[in-house]
Image (tube, rainbow, N blue to C red):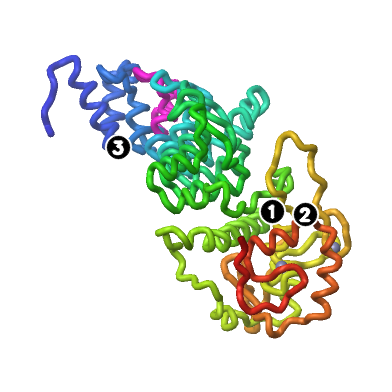
Amino acid sequence: MGQKLSCGTSDEHELFSAVQCGDLETVKGLFERNPSLVHHSTVYDRQSALHIAAANGQIEVVSMLVDQSVNVDLFNRYKQTPLMLAAMHGKISCVEKLIEAGANILMFDTLNGRTCLHYAAYYGHSDCLKTILCAAQTSHIASSWGYARFVNVKDGKGATPLHLAARQRRPECVHILLDNGALACASTGRYGFPGSTSLHLAARAGSLDCIRELLAWGADRLQRDDSGRIPYTIAFRHKHGACAALLNPSSAEPLVWPSPLKFISELNEEAKHLLECALIEANKEREKNILKGTTYSPPSPTNSDNEMDDNVSEVSDTEVCCICFDQVCTIQVQDCGHQMCAHCVLALCCHKKPSPTTTSPTAPVCPFCRSIIVQLDVIKLEKKDGTSHDVSSSKLRKSRRSRNFSEGSNSFKSLSAVSSFGKMVARGSGRIAAEDVYIDKPIILD
Ligand SMILES: [Zn+2]
Ligand SMILES: [Zn+2]
C-alpha cells in the first residue's frame, strides 16, 4: 500500500489498483490527467482497465469505461474479452452491462477456444449463463449462427458448455442448457476422454444431480466413449456408487421429457415448473428402489410408505386427479378445461426416449375429450380462508380412502388408449398399477 512505481508506470499502476477496488474518483482523476491511459494494459496478461473492472465486478467503473466508448471487446493476452472474465467470475451486473453495450458473445479465447458461455457454465454461474443465452436469442447470433448452434458451441477440444457444466458438477447450469436445446448425447472430441458424452463426464465427477438432469433429457446410458466405455463403467471405477446405480443399464429407465421438446418450451412458466417438479419427483421415487442396494441413501426422510400424506390433504374430493386418485389436480387443459395432476400430464406426454431417427410423435391429447392439448394452465387452489395456495410448492396428496371409485374406473378406460400411461405410473410412483387402484402398499417393480 502506498508504494509508487517510478515515473511512467506509476500512473498505470495506480489506475489498475483503483479499478480493481472500484475507486471511481481516482480512476476519473487519472483519466483526466492522462487520457491515453485508456489504452494501457497490464504488462504480462495484457489486461485492460475494463478487463480488471469486469473481473472484479466493479460495475461503476465498467459503466464509466463503457460510456467513454472504450472498445468492449478488447483482448487480453489470451484473447479473452472483459465479458468472458465477468462470466468467469460470476459478475452478473457487469455481464449485463457489457452485453447491453454490444459486447460480442461469440468470441473464442486462445487458451482453450472457449466462449463466454463456456466460462459461465464451467464456473457454474447460472445467472450469467441465462443472461448470455437470452442475449443470444435476441441478437444477430440467432439468425446468423443459429441459436441451437450457439448453445452447443464447441471449444478447441470439442467440449460444449453442457460438457463443462456436467464435468464441473453444475446441475443448475446443466438444466438451463438442456432446457435451451443443448444436446444431451453430443460427445466431445479430445476433451476429457475422447468421445465422452456429458453423461460420461457427470459420471466421472460423481454428480448425481447432473446425471438425473441428463437422464431426464434423454441422455443415453448405453452410449460409449472412444474407448468403448459406458457411463456406468466410469462411475463404478470412480466409486460413485449411487451414480453407478442410476447409470446401470439394467436398472429401471427414468422418465424422460416429452419429445418434441417444443411442447414443453411453449408452456407457460408456471405449468412448466409444475411438470418439472413432477418429473423430478417421479424419478426420485423410482430411484429409491434403485438406490436401496447401494450405500447411498436419498437425502429426503422418505420411508417406502407415505403414511403422513393423509394428514397433508385438506382439499375436497373434487380436486383430486381423476386419473391417478393420488395427487391433487394442478393443471388444466386450455379450452376444454379438463383437470389433472402434473404427474398424469407428464405421463400423457412422456415418451420412453426421444430418438432423432423416429418420426415426430403425435401431439398429446386430453384423456377426457381427446382434443389436442395446445396449452396447459396452472390451477390456483382456493383455501378455506380465501387465500390462494401455491400448488407448485406443496406436495399435496389425497388419501386414497376418500376417493370416488366409479369415476375412477371410467377415466381409466378412456386412458387405455394412451400407451405409455400404465407403464409410467407403475414405474413412476410405484403407488398404483393398472386398474387395481386400491392398493395400500407401494408396488416394487423389477
Ligand atoms: Zn393424476
Ligand atoms: Zn379435455
Please identify the quarter of the rendering in which residue 124 is found: top left
Residue 134 seen in render: no
Relative horizontal placement of residue 262, taking residue 418 as reference (left or right):
left
Name the element at disc 1.
Answer: loop
Image quadrant holding the N terminus, namely: top left
Mark whose residue sits in front, 1 or 3: 1
Say which amino acid is labelled 3.
Gly
In the rendered structure, which segment of residues is drawn in magenta? 63-86
Q: 373 or 15, which lies in front?
A: 373
Residue found 61% across the figure and 40% down from its top: 180
Image quadrant holding the C terminus, namely: bottom right
Relative horizontal placement of residue 216, taking residue 341 as reference (left or right):
left
The residue indicated by pointer 2 is 375
Residue found 12% across the figure and 17% down from its top: 6
Q: Is residue 74 magenta?
A: yes
Say which amino acid is labelled 1.
Asn
Name the element at disc 3.
Answer: loop
Please state the horizontal and vertical placement of residue 114, each as a whole percent of the image: 46, 25
Above or below, comparing residue 305 to residue 178 in the picture: below
The residue indicated by pointer 3 is 22
The residue indicated by pointer 1 is 268
* Quadrant field for ligand 2: bottom right
Residue 55 seen in render: yes
Say which amino acid is labelled 2.
Gln
Whole-Å distance between the Cαs marked 1 and 3?
41 Å
